[in-house]
Amino acid sequence: MPDITCIGRYWPGDSPIHRMDARAKLLLSLAVMAIAFVAQTFCSLAVVAVFVTGLFVLSGIPLGSALRSIVPLIFIVVITALLNVLFVQTGDVVAHWWVITITTGGIRMAFFIALRLVILLLAMSLLTLTTPTLDITDAFEYLLGPFRRFGLPAHELSMMMGLALRFMPLFVGELTTIYRAQVSRGAVLSKWRVSTLTALLVPLFTSAFRHAETLSAAMDARCYHGADGRTRLHPLSYTSLDRNGVIAVALLLALTVAANFLPL
Amino acid sequence: MRVAFEQVSYSYRKADPAEAKGGRGLRRGKAKERATASEQALGRAEWGADPNERWALRDVSFVVEPGEFLGLAGHTGSGKSTLIQHMNGLLHPTQGRVLVDGRDLADKSWAQQCRGSVGLVFQYPEHQLFAPTVAQDVAFGPRNLGLSGDELDARVRQALERVHLDVGEVGGRSPFELSGGQQRRVAFAGVLAMDPQVLVLDEPVAGLDPVAREDFLALIAELHAGGMSVVMASHNMDDLARLCDRILVLNGGSAFALGSPEDVFSQGEALRSIGLDVPPAQRMAEQLRAEGFALPRALYDTESLAEDLAPQLGGSAAPAFGRKEGACA
Amino acid sequence: MDDKAVAHPGLAGVPASAGAPGLAGASGELVGAFGSVGTSGDAGCAPGEMPRATDGTAVDFDGIRFTYDGEAFVLDGIDLSVPEGQFLCILGGNGSGKSTLARHINALLLPDEGQVTVLGWSTDDPRCTFDIRSHAGMVFQNPDDQLVASVVENDVAFGPENLGVAPDELQRRVIEALGNVGLQGFDLRETTALSGGQKQRVAIAGVLAMRPRILVLDEATAMLDPRGRKGLMRLARELNEQGLTVVMITHFMDEAAQADRVVVLEVGRVVADGDPDAVLSDPARLESMSLDVPFVASLAVALRKRGVDVAVHVQPDLLKEELCALRSSR
């Protein structure tokens, strides 16, 4: 199974989620993320959580692996939770040191926001896990298509995004090697020095330029010339799966709003 | 400086349990414990106990004696790079230990001290150049060791001299202006400037054209002749046969063979069974021996092969004096 | 870029007909035949037209001179003609101009003097660029620098997608190309998870999917381990046997020894041109051209120095045979 702790990785499969149209998945993912914000109570948030879990089950991706895939971003959750604990002052005081007051309301809010963040990250992760990056960028291109008349280079942007996602794992690997090489020369990251940072970043940039030079020649050699006349191996097409997806998300919205009124 | 690997195993998945917990203090404590423990405390796991673990190295033990030239052979994925990164403490074994001069590298302070003495050169080292000038890039290493001023300048100059570059000529130039071969030399100098006693090289001549290759290998041989221990990973069996005192062959993370070039390369069939081969001259010798030629030596190179073959074909063992060197037939 | 697109209204949606000359279908026989070409008019090339050369020349370099910076000529008078179906190896040391020459084949670079003609099309004519590039595919040195997609099948389809090939035909070509490079079943694999050798095969598949007649390998094995190199060489030979013209840029002797013809470049000029045995058997000369000497040639020379009258071969098996024959004749 692929090493999942990296954005841009794809988990091959043939589930209904995998087979959905990328544009639908993109829009519906955004919708689910928005609905996570519509949820105001633990109960309604739980509804969304259950929905997202259900999606993972449907996709055939183990939830454990899914959670591991968002580990690199866990710091966002931790920081946000911490901020809430420290600065939300409602309910009973639980602890008090110096200027820091921790309240039950703070803790409650922290959990809530953390849970919501995890749901958001999982929804985003599901999109990239079940959709080849080329399809995601194709989806962007289609959806941004109407804006071309306003001068937005939709195709070029989506090409850039696709390439960036494809090269990200490579750069992570190269950065690791660069880091190890500089550490082998005695660099210590904990001792903050400008030279240490340049020792890491400059090689990364030169590597990027090196790749870019050959890559553009390779793309030219394969007759790349922009969007005109370009066909696609898997043209995006809506199917009943997508209609079902829309219905499912609509139901989710309804349930979530309803659950908001439950006293929990 | 003596580097010893004792039953070293390394797995990608699970990092050293001692490191996962707590901070520095705990780590140092554990390391000291291990450093004084005897073999039984190392606790060998049953292989296959956890099918999810991916063992990059399994139970590898060997020693690099001071002044030795040790070759490291093995196809991609055999664990060469992982092993190399254990030598200066970049990676720590999941089991077993790596000792430098008797002290365990798991002890972070010792590993930091050894950074300068065990110099590690990665593949395509010129990709790590970053400073505005060659001199500054080469100075990075020694500066991290705490040197400055005249001493630093002297180190930089000496290091560049050792790779046959002139500090006056290239010192002030940007490393990116230089040719590929020169850039690699600068990267080498950057490691040499730390005055290592052990030089560890991961495929040092990868991607070089024939002339640059030979120059580099000659440079490495020169450094070794000056007393440095060298560990060199390579795909080229011929290079290993020529330069190394001993060769360690890895296969699937385990030590497959360890011995002199004669010992290792007389096992042609075994090496081929794991996807490697012997130097071309040795291969030819094997094939000719099978055809009935008398070739008694354990390891052959071009000259020795010609020497032993010629008498059996109507020639003489020694090159005839004054004979014209071979032109087109 | 946009001009080119407009000038090729016919390209978009041009179906890859069965008549397109190029690589084999799964059965191994050539789909289409050499010689099914359009009329050779002098009006420059029309979009979508079949290659014009009927004389069987794949690439023709005529008096090529080229400089990057306007001062030093990296290519200094190259006259070379490559017949179709040949396995040509271009050897040269650092700075010999070999990679620069390779990039003239698919019009990535244009000569400052002289003319390059590929399958009858001139690289000078911008209207022919697409045709040239789709018929003369190139694989580069660094496997990672050629893969544009995260999934294998998408990467292989990239070339024909750019040519406007229809989706179901695209699917067919991807499967066929992956089969031709020995990567059947790899279509849904992640490109980042492949080995160097496998990545290069995917790159070759991506080129084959455009149904080329020429394959240019620009030091394509330089970054591979010995296993990867051997595999790629075997593949190149197989493709050549099926009719593909292969131009291989390298500095590895054992690879050059397997070619039909070896051309040695030095400082931008051709200094040797012939079959491998002839070109690679003079070690002194090779060394003077900053090249490696093949082991077999060194051995033969060492034996000759010791009074053994043996021909200088570049193929190990031939030398072995001759040695055995020599011994039994004594």
Image (tube, grey):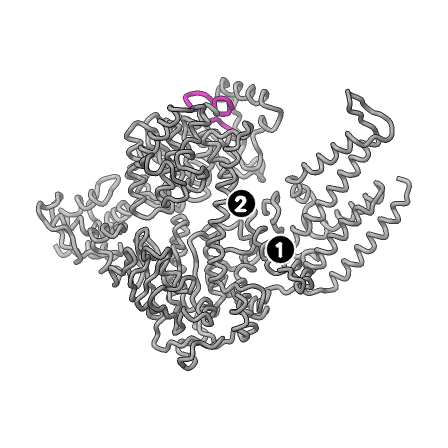
Observer-nearest residue: C330 or B25? B25
Q: Give me the C-alpha separation between circle 2 and circle 1.
A: 19 Å
- Residue A256 is labelled as none
Would you call the spot at circle 1 few (<14 residues within 10 Å), some (14-19), or many (20 or more)? many
Observer-nearest residue: B12 or B205? B205
C131 to the left or right of C57: right
A14 to the left or right of C21: right
- Quick check: can you spot residue B1? no
The reply to whether the magenta stretch includes residue A176 is no
In the rendered image, the quadrant that contains the C terminus of chain A is top right
Observer-nearest residue: C281 or B163? B163
Picture layout, residue C263 above or below residue A182: below
In this rendering, the label closer to the viewer, 2 or 1: 2
Which quadrant of the figure has residue B15? top right
Disc 1 marks which amino acid?
Pro
Observer-nearest residue: B134 or B26? B134
Disc 2 marks which amino acid?
Phe
The residues colored magenta run B95-110
Q: Residue furthest top?
A: B36
Where is mark 1, residue-wise?
A: A132
Where is mark 2, residue-wise?
A: A171
Mark 2 residue element: helix
Mark 1 residue element: loop
Q: Mark 1 lies on which chain?
A: A
Counting from the top left corner in percent of width and height, residue B310 is at 15, 47
Mark before the other along the chain sequence, 2 or 1: 1
- Quick check: can you spot residue B142? yes
The reply to whether the magenta stretch includes residue B107 is yes
| Residue occupying image coordinates x 37% and y 26% | B197
Q: Which chain carries label 2?
A: A
Counting from the top left corner in percent of width and height, residue A142 is at 67, 62
C236 to the left or right of B243: right
